[in-house]
Amino acid sequence: MFWEQNTADHCSQSTKSSLDGVVAENERTQMKILEMFDIVKRISDNLPKEIGYAWEGGWTDANKPIRFQDALGRNLILPYMFCSNQEVRL
């Protein structure tokens, strides 16, 4: 009976020690995740709300982009630099 009690105590101490290790590792992992989330949040907050193309406004009035609107009302912006001449090809 003494051996059984001693073994049970040892097993419970071993299990408790293992669980303490798991809990500590879990806490470290949670802290790393929170740090990563904080970094991503700061990066996200500092991104521009819209990322457009530099050519959307044109550098001068002579090379402003060509704006199309299709039958469904969708807008398309074609950069002037893609137009080599006024010829239309299909």
Image (spheres, rainbow, N blue to C red):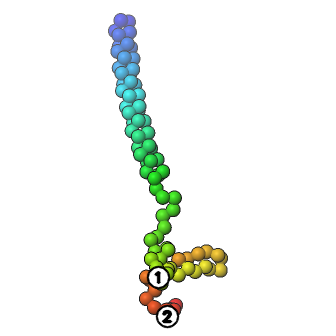
**Residue 75, horizontal then vertical, whole percent:** 59, 75
Mark 2 sits on what residue? 87
Residue 63 disc label = 1
Circle 1 sits in a helix, a strand or a loop, which is it?
A: helix
Closer mark to the observer between disc 1 and disc 2? 1
At label 1, the amino acid type is Asn
Task: Name the foreground residue: 85 vs 72.
Answer: 85
Q: Quadrant of residue 10?
A: top left
Q: Quadrant of residue 20?
A: top left
**Residue 61, horizontal then vertical, whole percent:** 49, 81
Vertical position of residue 84 compared to residue 65: above or below: below
Q: Quadrant of residue 18?
A: top left
Vertical position of residue 36 compared to residue 59: above or below: above
Name the residue at the front extreme: 61
At label 2, the amino acid type is Glu
Vertical position of residue 74 compared to residue 3: above or below: below
Name the residue at the top extreme: 2
